[in-house]
Structure formats: structure tokens, C-alpha cells
Amino acid sequence: MDLSNYEERMQKSLTNLEGEYTAIRAGRANPRILDRIQIDYYGTPSPLQSVANISVPEARMIQIQPWDASLIKDIEKAILSSDLGLTPANDGKVIRLVFPELTEERRKELAKEVKKKGEDAKVAIRNIRRDANDFVKKEAKANTISEDEQKQSEDEIQKLTDRYVAKIEKAIETKSNEVMTV
């Protein structure tokens, strides 16, 4: 029985979770939090990285230098309307995003958010397991596979699920530790 389709879907869920985790800031400046920001560049929504140079001159600051100075206002607007919770400072040539030191309370909130996103990913993995098991049961009902093959496939599906749930647990633990580290 070929489970590669289901494994691929589980990998996508894990990759999606890791992508969401990059957007959660842990007190340090990480340019990846800007990955989802789109700028209207001559009528075309473009990722911020394609219209500006993004650098991290200090541990808690991101500097954005647009290649076209006329984009400064658009970039500023996009950052303000995003869910980053940062106020951009611009000097006409560059935009600076300063990350405030996280309070203990905010760290705990972020750790809860990390856990919630991880739980959502686990639910997605379990849904994929359910789809795979339903497919195996249909195959068994249609007599295209034997009961032994059905049992073996269900065991493989469970092992695959356990492996991805463990990877998600590891990602949750890693990100939670990163968020809680002062």
C-alpha cells in the first residue's frame, strides 16, 4: 500500500507549522517575520523581500531599505496594517523596526500561542490519519486488499502519524524554549 500521498500531506502540515513559528517573534529580530508582508509594487502585490534590502544591524532591530525610495510609505503602511504589532520608524531612506524587550507575561502568551498552533497541527495530522484509514477500509470493503493487508496498512499509518506528532512535539518544545528564554 502506497502511503506517500498521506506522508506528503503530513510533511506539509509540519512545514506550515514551522512557517507559522517563524512569524512568532521571540525578542530577537528575525527578518523571517516579514515573509508574509506584501507591498503593492506598480499594481502587483510583491513580497517585501523583492522590493527592499532587509538586514539585522542589531539583535533587536530590523532595517528595511527599499530599492525604490517612493515605496517607503507603502512599506510603512503594510507593516502597520500587519499583525506584527511593531511601529516602523523611517528617516526618508530606511525603515527601522525596533523590537521591544518581551515581558514575562508576553512570553507566556507567546508560549500559549506556540502550543495552540502545535495542537492545530496535530489535529491536521490526525485528520490525515483518518483519511488514510478510511481509504484502507474502503479498499478492504471492496475486497481489493486482504484483512492482513488492511491491518498492516493501518499499523503503518499509525507509525507514520506517531512519527509526525513527535516531530510537532519537538517543534513546540523548541519554539517554547526560544520564546521563554530571556
Image (cartoon, grey):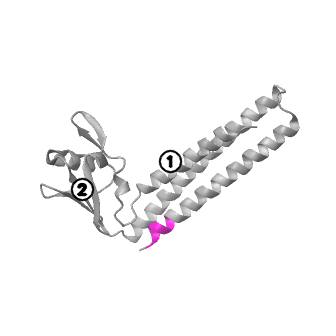
* SS class, disc 1: helix
For the N terminus, the image quarter is: top right
At label 2, which amino acid type do we have?
Ile
For the C terminus, the image quarter is: bottom left
Q: What residue is rendered at 21% in x and 35% in y?
A: 42
- In this figure, which residue is indicated by the disc labeled 2? 64
Let me know if residue 79 is in the magenta part. Answer: no
Q: Which mark is residue 63?
A: none
Q: Which mark is residue 16?
A: 1
Q: What residue is rendered at 60% in x and 59% in y?
A: 169
Q: Residues within 10 Å of mark 1 (few under 14, many from 20)?
A: few
Q: Residue 44, position in %: x, y?
A: 27, 34
Q: Which residues are magenta?
A: 176-181
At label 1, which amino acid type do we have?
Asn
Residues 34 and 124: in front is 34
For marks 2 and 1, the one nearer the N-term is: 1
Q: What residue is rendered at 64% in x and 54% in y?
A: 165
Q: CA distance from mark 2 to mark 1?
A: 25 Å
Q: Is residue 174 above or below residue 136?
A: below
Residue ranking furthest to the left:
92
